[in-house]
Image: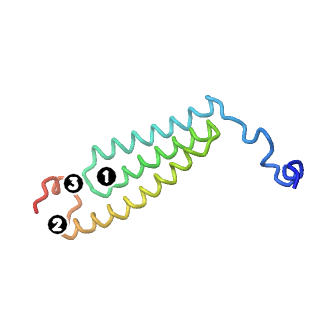
Amino acid sequence: MSPGLLLSLFPIAQAGFPEPMGGATLAPYLFVSALLFVIGMVGFITRRNLIIMFLCTELMFQAAGLALVAFSRFYLEHTGQTFVIFVLTVAAAEAALALALVVLLFRKKDSLSGEEWREMQG
């Protein structure tokens, strides 16, 4: 199959696609990513409910993923998107473990306050 025929069959594979992002188009994505990360960090530090703390860590994971995808698109490489897949995998495993831990802790003390679980006794 000739390259010209291949390009005519798949116009998305034409040269110059996708066009590089400019610095002005990268900035809003990074601003939103930083804002999400700060909201997650402030929420994690200030809240005492274990479920809210868990959700704030997930928000920080998603903020990092957004930044990785933005940089990946900016440099026209797939490495950032590949890292996002790994971040999502780690976040899913963390979600399963954290939810199981929260359920176990709630059954023991009937509370989800982080203050009550500050000192764990064996």
How far is disc 3 from disc 2 in space, using C-alphas?
Answer: 11 Å
Nearer-N-terminus badge (2/1): 1
Structural crowding at the residue carrying mark 2, measured as other residues with C-alpha within 10 Å and reported as few (<14), some (14–19) or many (≥20): few
- Which residue: 44% across, 42% down? 36
**Horizontal relation, residue 41 to residue 83: left or right:** left
Element on which disc 2 rests: helix
Relative height, residue 107 to residue 24 (above, below): below
Q: How far apart are marks 3 and 1 (CA)?
A: 9 Å
Q: Do the residues labelled 3 and 1 touch (CB within 8 Å)?
A: yes
Relative to residue 11, is residue 63 drawn left or right? left
Q: Where is residue 6 in the image (x, y as percent from the top left)?
A: 85, 52
Q: Which residue is label 1 attached to?
A: 53
- Mark 3: which amino acid? Gly
Q: Nearer the viewer, residue 70 or 42?
A: 70
Give the label on residue 65, or none.
none
Label 3, secondary structure: give it: loop
- The residue labelled by disc 2 is 109
Q: Categorize mark 1 by other alpha carbons within 10 Å: few (<14), some (14-19), many (20+).
A: many
Disc 1 residue type (three-letter):
Met
In space, the residues marked 2 and 1 are separated at their CA atoms by 18 Å
The residue that label 3 is drawn on is: 114
